[in-house]
């Protein structure tokens, strides 16, 4: 539950009273005062005064009383990613493929993952309750929105999902082994050998670009047509890469286990940073 704040560009930090002991995995500030944090046990924290105080809630599906006992494995999912593009419009992703969206600054939230169900071809096991079919979706770790309409998320099993309408509908995105190569024809949810690396971080950059990063040094770049290709410009590293962040279309960082990569030419070249 630790939240730290700096007011001098990182020279000094102070610990804030988050009012929780739960793990916090992601945060998003659309401006200096409004911030949102998500974490363990469906935790959502928000502040409207730059962290002077926090409002705490749990964001989870409410099950009918007659199936609540059967729903215990799906209650209080971990929430891994949050992104707000302004004070009102924000999204959260997490465990079991959960996607939530708000258009009023978090006063109310709506689930958005149902549009993925017809695309996800994972067969249920014998005895599985069909009422929990949507919880077969892969967990989502990273989230990024370019504006109020265009967004993408990534996660377990290496899939990227994207929306062009603010989350009303989401689609699984195909991948290619390198830029310019034909995309694969894998079916979302179908068994795949070898398995794709999980993707932990994603960012949509500028008007049409994007990058994602994950386990064993996986680095993908968004291509025309919504295809994500393995980026040969990123040094091949055997380490997990957890986040990608660009401050503008030219300057960006990829970080991971003991690793910081930096580019100042839009990703044409990357260099290792040492401290």
Image: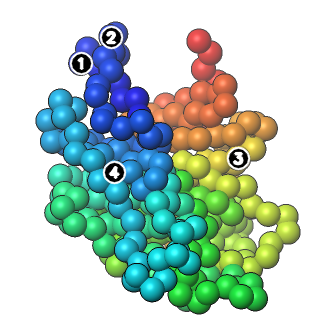
> Mark 3 or 2, which is nearer the eye?
2
Calculate the distance from the C-alpha at mark 1 to the C-alpha at mark 3: 33 Å
Q: Is residue 28 left or right of residue 153?
A: left
Q: Which mark is residue 44?
A: 4
Q: Mark 3 highlights which residue?
A: 215
The quarter of the rendered structure image containing the C terminus is top right
Q: Nearer the viewer, residue 134 or 185?
A: 134
Q: N-terminal of the two: label 3 or label 2?
A: 2
Q: Nearer the viewer, residue 31 or 80?
A: 80
Q: N-terminal of the two: label 4 or label 3?
A: 4
Measured from the top left, where is residue 150 in percent x and y?
Answer: 36, 66
Residue 268, compared with residue 258, is above or below; it is below
Q: Mark 2 highlights which residue?
A: 12
Q: Mark 1 highlights which residue?
A: 7
Q: Which mark is residue 20?
A: none
- Residue positioned 46% across, 60% down in the render: 76
Q: Is residue 149 left or right of residue 155?
A: left
């Amino acid at each position: 539950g630790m939240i730290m704040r700096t007011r001098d560009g990182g020279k000094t930090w102070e610990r804030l009273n988050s009012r929780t002991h739960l793990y916090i995995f992601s945060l998003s500030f659309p401006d200096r005062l409004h911030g949102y944090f998500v974490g363990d046990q469906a935790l959502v924290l928000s502040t409207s005064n730059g962290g002077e105080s926090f409002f705490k809630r749990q964001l989870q599906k409410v099950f009918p009383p007659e199936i609540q006992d059967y729903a215990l494995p799906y209650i209080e999912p971990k929430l891994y990613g949050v992104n707000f593009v302004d004070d009102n419009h924000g999204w959260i992703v997490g465990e079991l493929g959960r996607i939530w969206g708000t258009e009023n600054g978090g006063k109310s939230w709506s689930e958005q993952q149902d549009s993925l169900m017809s695309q996800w071809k994972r067969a249920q096991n014998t005895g599985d309750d069909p009422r929990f079919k949507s919880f077969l979706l892969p967990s989502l770790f990273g989230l990024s929105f370019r504006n109020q309409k265009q967004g993408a998320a990534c996660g377990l099993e290496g899939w990227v999902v994207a929306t062009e309408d603010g989350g009303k509908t989401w689609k699984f995105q195909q991948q290619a082994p390198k830029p310019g190569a034909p995309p694969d024809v894998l079916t979302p949810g179908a068994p795949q050998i070898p398995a794709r690396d999980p993707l932990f971080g994603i960012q949509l950059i500028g008007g049409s670009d994007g990058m994602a990063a994950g386990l064993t040094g996986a680095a993908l770049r968004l291509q025309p047509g919504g295809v994500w290709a393995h980026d040969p410009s990123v040094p091949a590293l055997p380490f997990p890469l957890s986040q990608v962040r660009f401050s503008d279309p030219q300057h960006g960082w990829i970080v991971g286990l003991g690793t910081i990569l930096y580019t100042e030419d839009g990703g044409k070249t990357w260099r290792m940073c040492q401290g």
